[in-house]
Amino acid sequence: MTASPAYTVDVRRLEAFSAVDLYAMLKMRVDVFVVEQSCPYPELDGRDPDCQHLRLLDGKDLLACARLWRPVADAHPRIGRVAVSPDHRGKRLGEALMREAITACERLYPNEAIALSAQSHLMHFYEAFGFSPTSEEYLEDGIPHVDMLRPPSPGNA
């Protein structure tokens, strides 16, 4: 089992990023979701300004990122755009990223269930963090997905 590298956690709104840091995060998301997955879709979907963006960093090096947001006042907070840099895979950063994203959501949106739309092949990965499927499988941008929900943590409910 490979140990997780040391990292720092950074959570901020879009307007708080430097141009260089914003470019690095958006480039990584495009590299993972559009290029690597051969999935031409609108990565820049207009939602980023309404989100908190979580990054795992090793110094200035971007290891992983996720988007945290509440789409509308009566909807569950969501974790999305979960991505680990291809240069840093195999270091258990996916697990670290999800732990940090859940912690940040619980801080930002206490006593709330957390939603996400999981690529179907990753459903068991998210189940390990307490998420359960809430939909049948569906295609999103040509990739099978399933909606999932995690109830509030007992200490956070």
Image (cartoon, helix red, strand yellow):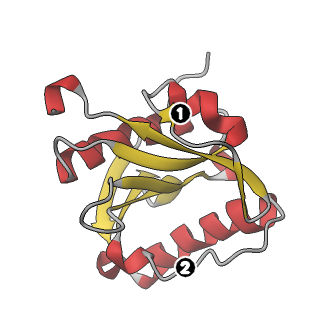
Residue 73: image location, x then y, percent: 24, 66
Is 103 in front, or is 69?
A: 69
Task: Locate the N terminus by quadrant.
Answer: top right
Residue 58: image location, x then y, percent: 45, 49
Instruction: Tell me where residue 120 sits by quadrant.
Output: top right
Please say if 142 is above or below 117: below
Residue 45, numbered circle: 2
- Provide the secondary structure element on which disc 2 rests: loop
Task: Locate the C terminus by quadrant.
Answer: top left
- Count every numbered label the image shows and give the total: 2
Say if residue 6 shows up in the picture.
no
The kind of residue tagged 2 is: Asp
Residue 79: image location, x then y, percent: 43, 52
The kind of residue tagged 1 is: Tyr
Distance (Cα) linking label 2 and label 1? 24 Å
Q: Which comes before the other along the chain, label 2 or label 1?
A: 2
Say if residue 41 shows up in the picture.
yes
Is 61 in front, or is 38?
A: 38
Residue 126, numbered circle: 1
Please say if 153 is above or below 84: above
Left or right: residue 157 versus residue 120 is left
Residue at (79%, 66%) from the top-left corner?
A: 39
- Provide the secondary structure element on which disc 1 rests: helix
Residue at (53%, 33%) from the top-left corner?
A: 126
Residue at (46%, 42%) from the top-left corner?
A: 97
